Image: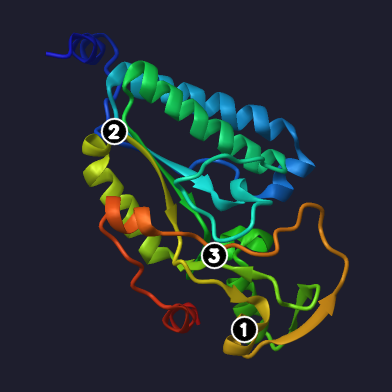
Amino acid sequence: VNYRRFFKSIYEPNYVVYDYIVHLGMYSSSPMYKEDPGLFDKVLNEYHALLSRAYYDKIPLIVTLTSSMYHPRKVPWSDRDLRMDPQDLYSLSRYFIMKLTEVYHRLYRVKAVCLILFSVYGPHEEYKGSYANCLTQMIWKKLLDEEFTIYGDGSQTRDFIYVDDVVECYMRSIERVKEIGFDVINVGTGKEYSFNEIAKKIGVKVRYTYKFPENYIYRTRAIITKMKEVLGYYPRVNINEGIDICY
């Protein structure tokens, strides 16, 4: 009997013990942290509280990380080599979350799977506004018959993965986290497409500007061997199908 849970349920009737925690509740774009550096402390403090809850109540965790942590390493990016040098507060916060989770697993046996998401896109991104995936924003511009602005010459690339494939990785992580114990897994397709290629597929009009944001990431591409081996999953939605669904 887990006596801590038993007495909590009696004396704190609103205290709920969960089977799993899937953590997606973090500010999720680099410009947010540049505008408000205090988000860095907020994200880490909130996550540490969540991790402590997972430890006390023996709740497995599924944690969301970002492929930006790999920047500025050359692609492709392997989740078997996690020696990273994050270049902004957004990426650094996720890196600390990953390392903190690893320490809690080693010291306290907290079970967790950390998923490193690449460029996730899909329908219903309207609520994200300017933080929506660039592919999605291209579709919006196409529907409005407006131009989409691309930095540089459009040769920069992203490893685009459709949201349904990402959800499947979360579900498989939930199913397997107890046997996995702890791991960090890339969630991408292993393929990269340039912005010019995506713009051509969508048929959006493009204009180019050469004023790059600081720490701009030029290429992303995941090595997804571990995703296939550990989660038993390979992405099912190709880029053309994903674009069609998003219209």
The image quadrant that residue 38 belongs to is top right
Between label 1 and label 3, give the one nearer the viewer.
1
Cα–Cα gap, marks 1 and 3: 21 Å
37 left or right, relative to 96: right
Q: Position of residue 152 (x, y in %)?
A: 81, 73
Question: Mark 1 or 3 closer to N-term?
Answer: 3
Three-letter code, disc 3:
Glu
126 left or right, relative to 205: left
**Residue 48 sits above or below residue 183 on the image:** above
The image quadrant that residue 217 belongs to is bottom right
Three-letter code, disc 2:
Gly
Tag on residue 85?
none
Which of the pair 148/13 is nearer the observer? 148
Q: Which residue is mark 1?
A: 197
Q: Which residue is mark 3?
A: 125
Q: Residues within 10 Å of mark 1 (few under 14, many from 20)?
A: some
Question: Mark 2 or 1 closer to N-term?
Answer: 2
Cα–Cα gap, marks 2 and 1: 40 Å
Q: Position of residue 35 (x, y in %)?
A: 78, 43
Tag on residue 181?
2
Q: How many marks?
A: 3
